[in-house]
Image: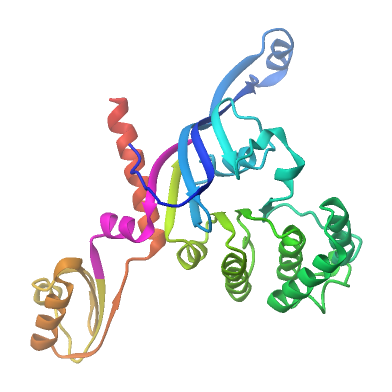
Amino acid sequence: MPFAFFISMAYQIEVTHLSKHYQVHEKEPGLMGSLRSFVARKYRAVKAVDDVSFNIGQGEMVGFLGPNGAGKTTTLKVLAGLLYPTSGKATVLGFTPNKRENAYLKQFTLVMGQKQQLMWDLPAQETFLVNQAIYEIPRAQYDATIKELDDLLELGPIMKKQVRKLSLGERMKCELAAALLHRPRVLFLDEPTIGLDVTMQARIREFIAEYNRRYGATVMLTSHYMADVTALCDRIIVIDKGRLFYDGNFRALIERVAPYKIIKLQLAQPTTAEALAQFGQVESCNGLTAVLHVPRATATESAARLLSQVKVEDVTFEEPPVEDIIREVFAGIGKDEARGAR
């Protein structure tokens, strides 16, 4: 049962009982299997998206999370109008996406980190000019937008280079620029930082945040890099096997799934795990270093007692790694499904 999340602002994305199912052909192995598939094909129903509902308000940046095959990209493609839903309803900016109306196509963008729209053998600026013509962007607005994007992404040195000669990070900056030339009000970002180094990932995140701030754009982001989500999104939607399992505040999920904080200690003298157990759950204790888990509600009190009774050289407080939190969420989903199957 998903947890509800409500907002008191105008919805720009509304999804109600959305489903997208496929019939997938399953062929038996060998020659006889191939021959049988000509006369008696076997199909398996795949529920890529199954009865999903959520709303997203203007200017929100929402993380859309789930393991591979969860239905994230399928949902984004339905919202972009690339796929027809099997059932249910989806509207974006008041439009029905699969109608592909020109007025709608000019107000959103879909950026897929593993796909590219740039023309491989030409400089990126040629793709920019093509998009200017497609979206009918007035020349003055085009020039102003290029200048803004150049200021934010430092495009000047690279947009005149042949795309095939750009690094992955440079190419991703040009992909984002091409996708945002028409100043879309809604951004669907599917793994926009995949394959990039840490520095470039941070740069892309800063750019997305600044675009959201300047234009009040609504952003729906999928990413396997939790740093993307934690840096940009207060709210997350968790989906698995096409079903919605969580919709709410990211911080609330962390506190619910991991109701503890981590204390890392550098000790002044060797101490045993048994001696530290009175202050919290000991994750590790190795001579002069130790890691403890302490309940959030008593973290300050536990730390004060520890510092007064144990000789400590250094101490740090940390939140549990977000990747661990998400893994626990997915593990919990699997346990719930197993119980329901019994």
Q: How many marks?
A: 0
Q: Is residue 329 magenta?
A: no
Which image quadrant is residue 234 in?
A: bottom left
Which image quadrant is residue 33 in?
A: top right
Is residue 223 left or right of 119 when viewed as pictured? Answer: left
Residue located 88% across and 61% down the image: 129
Closer to the camera in the image, 52 or 311: 52
Q: Quadrant of the N terminus?
A: top left
Is residue 196 left or right of 334 when viewed as pictured? Answer: right
Region rendered in magenta: 242-261
Q: How is the image coloured?
A: rainbow
Q: Is residue 56 above or below residue 304?
A: above
Q: Can residue 119 be spotted in the picture?
A: no
Locate residue 224, reporting x and y percent: 52, 56
Q: Can residue 34 be spotted in the picture?
A: yes
Is residue 294 left or right of 7 when viewed as pictured? Answer: left
Which image quadrant is residue 310 in?
A: bottom left
Q: Is residue 258 magenta?
A: yes
Locate residue 43, reporting x and y percent: 61, 18
Residue located 81% across and 69% down the image: 166
Residue located 73% across and 58% down the image: 179
Q: Residue furthest top?
A: 39
Locate residue 263, reporting x and y percent: 24, 76
Locate residue 105, reporting x and y percent: 73, 45
Q: Quadrant of the C terminus?
A: top left
Closer to the camera in the image, 310 or 285: 310
Residue located 77% across and 42% down the image: 102
